[in-house]
Amino acid sequence: MAGERTITLEVQRFHPEADEAPYLQPYTIPFSEGTSVLEGLQHIKDRLDGSLTFRWSCRMAVCGSCGCMIDGEPALACRAFLRDYAPGPVRVAPLDHLPIRRDLVVDQSDFLAKLERARTYLIPADERTPADGAYRQTPEEMADYYDYAQCINCLLCYAACPQYGWDQAFTGPAVLALVQRYDLDSRDAGKDARRAVVNADTGVWGCTLVGYCSEVCPKGVDPARAINQRKPASVADYLLGWLRPSGGEGTP
Amino acid sequence: MRRSHEPLLWLLFGAGGLLAAWLGPALILFTGILVPIAAERGVTLLGYEAARGLLQGPAGLAAVAVVTLLLFHAAHRIHHTLHDLGLPAGRRTRLGCYGAAVAGGALAAAAVLAL
Ligand code: SF4
Ligand code: FES
């Protein structure tokens, strides 16, 4: 189309079976007001280079698969628009701090293992079956954790977190926010099971309140708030730990 | 997972921060600005004898506690800021930061006792 605007995407490539190190590959593509970075990548894959690999699914900031570094900032490719980076070039790279599997695809194993270890799921006080009916909760009770429940596991906060960048043992923003999400839920009784993860050096105490995680979070989860809201309770655990035989560590 | 001992440091840090916010500006205003200005004009707001009398009582203990906690607050923040700046903040910086706070507190205690 005549007069069509174009922009150059410098995409970081890396195929571990062939490449020694990641490198940038430029692609120039047409774009309009409503073209997202994700659509730019799709244009490249469909028309210019089928070997480009990236994750996506919902293309509406719900699934959390398309996170990447866009001009050095963690962002969802489907929620970032090329018009904001014009005239370009705009650099697209895999999320910082995570191992690269291929091109823009990162390895999430560490995050998933941490999610599991932290038991970020509802642990009810008593055995229930669907026959017991719905779990009731007032709007006020829901408000306690609702913001934290918006997490889509996109890992932007892990790419933003300098502590995680330095030491991958740190449990990290999203998992700790999700611990709060369940601990604050009136239907949950799993606080003891999550205590050890929270109270460790790699738990809430690994955070020095840099706050970049909350800035990049596309869902307004505010993990920095969740973590620091939890510190007083962790202090209480610590002090009570001197009185309790389990030492306030809970089950590991 | 090993339990962190950070809560202890964080408590002291929090206490120092609270005191700094509550008392810091008032103390600076009074002892650092108002008393000297008044003294320049020949008005004694807090003379040596009065201050000495005050500090020899329980207020002396409180003053030492406030000074120590304020220093502890600073030490904790500096230690973590070093780490955030990517400087290797290990045992030695830890010792240096918290050690300086303890030394400052000891100095304050010695000064009060020497009155
Ligand atoms: S807390 Fe926010 S940035 Fe982190 S994974 Fe969840 S949605 Fe993404
Ligand atoms: S494609 Fe689902 S969040 Fe971007």
Image (spheres, rainbow, N blue to C red):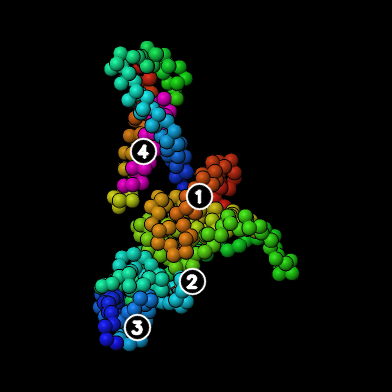
The percent coordinates of residue A187 (x first, y second) are 65, 58
Label 2 and label 4: CA atoms lie apart by 42 Å
Q: Which mark is residue B74?
A: 4
**Does mark 4 fall on the same chain as mark 1?**
no
Residues rendered magenta in the picture: B63-82
For the point 46% across and 57% down, the residue is A222
Q: Which residue is mark 2?
A: A62
Mark 2 lies within 8 Å of ligand 2 (Cβ measured): yes
Q: Which residue is mark 1?
A: A229
Q: Is residue B71 magenta?
A: yes
Q: Amino acid at mark 2?
A: Val
The percent coordinates of residue B67 (x first, y second) are 39, 29
Mark 1, secondary structure of its residue: helix
Label 1 and label 4: CA atoms lie apart by 21 Å
Q: Amino acid at mark 4?
A: Ala
The percent coordinates of residue A179 (x first, y second) are 53, 58
Q: Amino acid at mark 1?
A: Gln
Q: In this rendered view, identify the residue nearer to me: A246 or A211.
A: A211
Foreground tag (3 vs 4): 3
Rendered position, A232 above or below B56: below
